Amino acid sequence: MRVDDVFLRVCDTRIVGDSDSNHVIREWQLREGKYEELGTTDEACLLDADQPWKELPRIKATTEKLTLV
């Protein structure tokens, strides 16, 4: 079996806060690219979503400070 032109896309959201504060930080990233362009050729890395994420180029990113009411 052969699969060509596989495209990977990861949308990652992280929320960080402190229990003593009424603010949280929200970070959002879009990373995407072709499988052939990844730095690794180890197919086992695709079983763990954190592995390809490290290799994909960041396309967009936002950071927001949110106030909780």
Image (cartoon, helix red, strand yellow):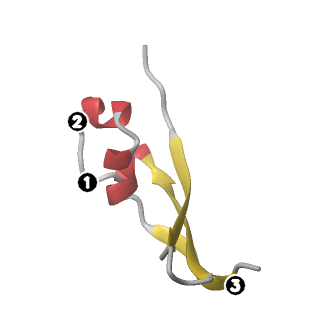
Identify the element where label 1 is drawn: loop
Q: Residues within 10 Å of mark 3 (few under 14, many from 20)?
A: few
In which quadrant will I find the N terminus? top left
32 and 29: which is toward the camera: 29
Residue that numbered label 1 is attached to = 39
**Mark pair 3, 1: CA separation:** 39 Å
Residue that numbered label 2 is attached to = 42
Which residue is rendered at x = 33% and y = 58% of the image? Answer: 54
Amino acid residing under circle 1:
Gly
Which residue is rendered at x = 48% and y = 55% of the image? Answer: 33
Q: With respect to residue 60, does 47 lie above or below?
A: above
Amino acid residing under circle 2:
Asp
**Mark pair 3, 2: CA separation:** 43 Å
Quadrant of the image occupied by residue 48: top left
The residue mark sitting in front, 3 or 2, is: 3
Q: Position of residue 44 (x, y in %)?
A: 26, 30
24 and 56: which is toward the camera: 24
Q: Which mark is residue 59?
A: none
Residue that numbered label 3 is attached to = 67
Which residue is rendered at x = 60% and y = 83% of the image? Answer: 23
